[in-house]
Image: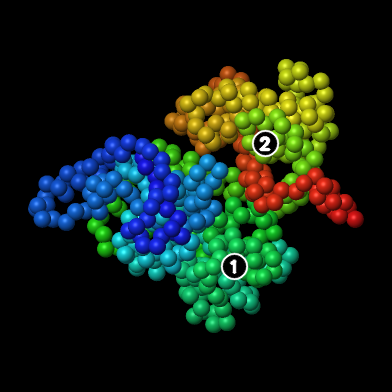
Amino acid sequence: MHKFIIPVDELQQFSHNRPLDVKKRSPVKKGLGTFVLLWLLIFLSACEKTRPTSTLERILDDGVLKVGTNYGLTTYFNGATGPEGFEYELAEGFAEYLGVRLEVFPYYTLNELFPQLSHHHLDLIAAGISVTPERYEQFRFGPAYQNVSQKLVFKQGNVRPRSAVDLTEDILVIAGSSHAETLRTFKPFHPNLNWQETDEKDAEELMEMVLNDELAYTIVDSNILAVLRRRHPELSIGFTINQEQGVAWALDKAQDDSLLAALIEYFGQIQTNGRLAALEDKYFGHVRLFNYVDTREFIRSARTVLPTYRHLFEQYANDIDWRLLAAMSYQESHWDPQAKSATGVRGMMMLTLATARDLDITSRLDPEQSIRGGTDYFSQLLKRIPARIQEPDRIWFALAAYNIGLGHLEDARVLTQKQGGNPDMWIDVKKRLPQLRQKKYYKTTRYGYARGDEAVSYVDNIRRYYDTLVWIDEQDPLTLDEAQIATSEDTE
């Protein structure tokens, strides 16, 4: 499938856009489901020769699906290996389902994005759009695939607003957003409520303004807040300003039903085969739970303790991201070389005595030896995970095995298969791991009882730590000297 990524700053005139990122795939139209094919056959046979071409027919004939989105953590962004984002991956899957190439048009503002549908420049919008009453009047929507609520956010330590009555200062929200619509519905009941709308800031920037005391409050969707609180734990929730709303793709209201029918079948298919749940888990599954104290302490340690050992993680990482190894080490020992548990595991990577001997580790309390040994052991586990298992699930399985052992992991995969789940998908296996604590399940397994629920928490914690480390490292990583300075300032 060809994949065209066209940033909005390249859009002088839409018809003259040039693709900037291309991935090739044979555009064979083999992904269409039986419902859509049947719909097309009936439509073709019943219509006269002069009938207009349907939206779906045009897309299939052109071999192109044009999708509009906006830049953001949960929509679309350019990652280390290319385009990423929850919405982007869903759109990529839909184009593959249709057997056409994907052209993505990312915009910076919602006010720029929405008119492109009525101007027939886009086939649909995939941008985490909440289905609100105002929007429902303007657009058609595909099936809802997520639910989000709107949270009033303020800075930890300031006076908490508990209702709209407590909002004594102006609010700043994104222009054209569902948050602005919510405030408009609140205004008749709260005449003193004041807000401004901006096209110059995104959700993350607005929350940074709150943290920098440049803004008292803002409103953010719950899924975006869950991700950002791993970076900014001081973001606190005042109250829920609007309960859950469905999130769906927007289509031109004037177009026929053909593309909507394809969307309905596509989302039904990925819900049935587990692809939707796997994508949601990839982007949001590990951030649903939030611990303010733990998150703040991790960020502090990442800036003050980790720089001392960073070179060792980098030295022994090989093909593994050193930040993942560092996240594992924090989960294991909080980067304490002398750490030990009641079960006898010791050191920064918490190696058992038997594992240390197998890896020729003479001192588990030596940071370099521990990091080298832990990395080697994790590499061995990765190689023993079945090759058919795709990333990132492959990594999550290896992490679980580091915690609970390959045997118990395999038991959970067997249980998953017996219960009709997919043993190669982390989202399915993580549901069965806690069953290893229940006799009716573990008595049927090869390796018996295990604390499988702890393995699930272990993986989720490391994923959170890793995401935060990536963000810190990409911002402005501290050097060792700066870390020592920061430590001395903390102790004064």
Query: Considering only vertical position in the picture, is 456 above or below 62?
Result: above
Q: Is residue 85 visible?
A: yes
- The dot on residue 322 is 2
The image quadrant that residue 173 belongs to is bottom right
Give the residue displayed 77% in from the left and 33% down from the top: 348
The quarter in which the N terminus is drawn is top left
Three-letter code, disc 2: Trp
Which of 291 and 98 lies nearest the eye of the viewer? 98
Q: Is residue 411 visible?
A: no
- The dot on residue 218 is 1
Query: Considering only vertical position in the picture, is 340 above or below 71?
Result: above
Q: CA distance from mark 1 to mark 2?
A: 35 Å
Residue 456: percent from the left, percent from the top?
Answer: 61, 36
Q: Which badge, 1 or 2, is on the more N-terminal residue?
A: 1
Three-letter code, disc 1: Thr
Give the residue displayed 63% in from the left and 77% down from the top: 169
